[in-house]
Image (spheres, helix red, strand yellow):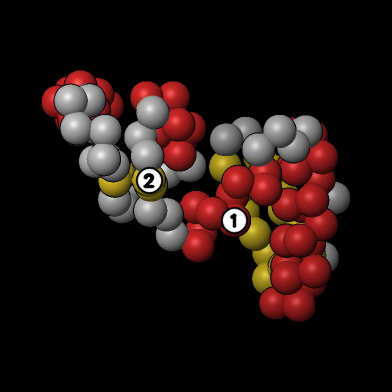
Amino acid sequence: MIPLPILRESLAIMAAQPQLELIWASPRELLNVFQADEIGCHIITVTNDILAKLALVGKDLSEYSLDTVKMVSPRRERIGVHGLRVSGATRAVRLGQPAAR
């Protein structure tokens, strides 16, 4: 369920009592932080994972993709995955030796 209509209605009800603050607890995704700001929610609780994702806002997607590849490649080498052989829609990972070219 999308909570925005309920939160908007709550804010409208609370408008008569300015000392009240609306708390959005346990958002599920980063988008919820922006939604809370958009509707004027006073407080939103977030997990450390969601909070860390705020640093990615505005990042160039090509740069982010490259950073991800750089992060994953050393792990692949460490566990012995040396490449992928791609045939149509099927992908096979060969463990322990370089993939055939």
Asked if residue 25 lies left or right of residue 92, the reply is left
Q: Which mark is residue 32?
A: none
Asked which quadrant contains residue 15, the reply is top left
Q: Amino acid at mark 2?
A: Ile
| Closer-to-camera residue (74/81) | 74
Asked if residue 59 lies left or right of residue 6, the reply is right
Provide the residue designation for mark 2. 43
The x, y position of residue 47, in whole percent, is: 43, 59
The x, y position of residue 88, in whole percent, is: 62, 33
Q: Amino acid at mark 1?
A: Ala
Asked which quadrant contains residue 98, the reply is bottom right
Mark pair 2, 1: CA separation:
18 Å
| Residue sitting at the far right | 101
- Mark 2 is surrounded, within 10 Å at the Cα level, by few (under 14), some (14 to 19) or many (20 or more) other residues, namely some
Residue lying at 78% horizontally and 33% vertically, measured from the top left: 60
Asked if residue 101 lies left or right of residue 80, the reply is right
The x, y position of residue 46, in whole percent, is: 42, 54
Residue lying at 74% horizontally and 37% vertically, measured from the top left: 59
Q: Is disc 1 placed on a helix, strand or loop?
A: helix
Residue lying at 82% horizontally and 57% vertically, measured from the top left: 70
